[in-house]
Image (cartoon, rainbow, N blue to C red):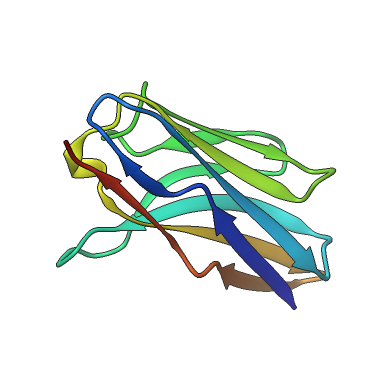
Amino acid sequence: QVRLVESGGGLVQPGGSLRLSCAASGIIFGINTMDWYRQAPGKERELVATITSSNSINYADSVKGRFTISRDNAKNTVYLQMNSLKPEDTAVYYCHIEQQIFSQLYYYWGQGTQVTVSS
C-alpha cells in the first residue's frame, strides 16, 4: 500500500504562484509515473501534468509554459510549481501514481488540495 499526502494549496491572486507537494509513504518501490490531476466544480477530473520514472514530462495544453512538474525520488515526492495562475486554475488538485510490482500495476490517489485563484 502507498499513501499520498498533498500539501501547498491555498488562496492566491491572479498572476501569483503556488508550489504543490505530494509525498508518498508505505511500500515505496516500482513507482512509474507520478501525475497531477485537477477537478473544478461541476467539471470532470483532468490530467494536468505527468512525469515518468525516466523524467519524461507531459503537460495539458492549458498549463504549458506556466506549470512545472518535478520529482525527487530520494524523497518519494512529486512537485507542481504553478506560476502565472489564472482564475480558471481554481480546482482541487490530486496527486496520482502508478506502481509496478513484478507484472502487476497499482494506482493510488491523494486526498486532494484546494487551489483557489481569486482577487
Relative horizontal placement of residue 75, taking residue 13 as reference (left or right): right
Instruction: Pinpoint residue 75: horizontal percent, then vertical percent.
Output: 80, 46
Q: How many marks?
A: 0
In the image, residue 27 lies at what x, y percent? 83, 70
Image quadrant where residue 82 sits: top left
**Would you say 19 lies left or right of 97 here?**
left
Image quadrant containing the C terminus? top left
Position of residue 94 measured from the top left corner of the image (x, y, whole percent): 46, 59
Is residue 87 shown left or right of residue 51? left
- Classify residue 57 by image quadrant: top right
Rendered location of residue 85, percent (x, y)? 29, 31
Residue at 37 percent across and 21 percent down: it is: 65
Choose between 67 and 58: the one closer to the eye. 67
Quadrant that contains the N terminus: bottom right
Relative to 14, residue 8 above or below: below
Work out whether 30 lies above or below 105. above
Taking 115 as reference, is 55 left or right? Answer: right
37 up-or-down from 4: above or below: above
Residue, far top: 65
Residue beneath the point at 33% across and 27% down: 16
The residue depicted at 52 percent of the width and 58 percent of the height is: 95
Which residue is more in the foreground, 75 or 117? 117
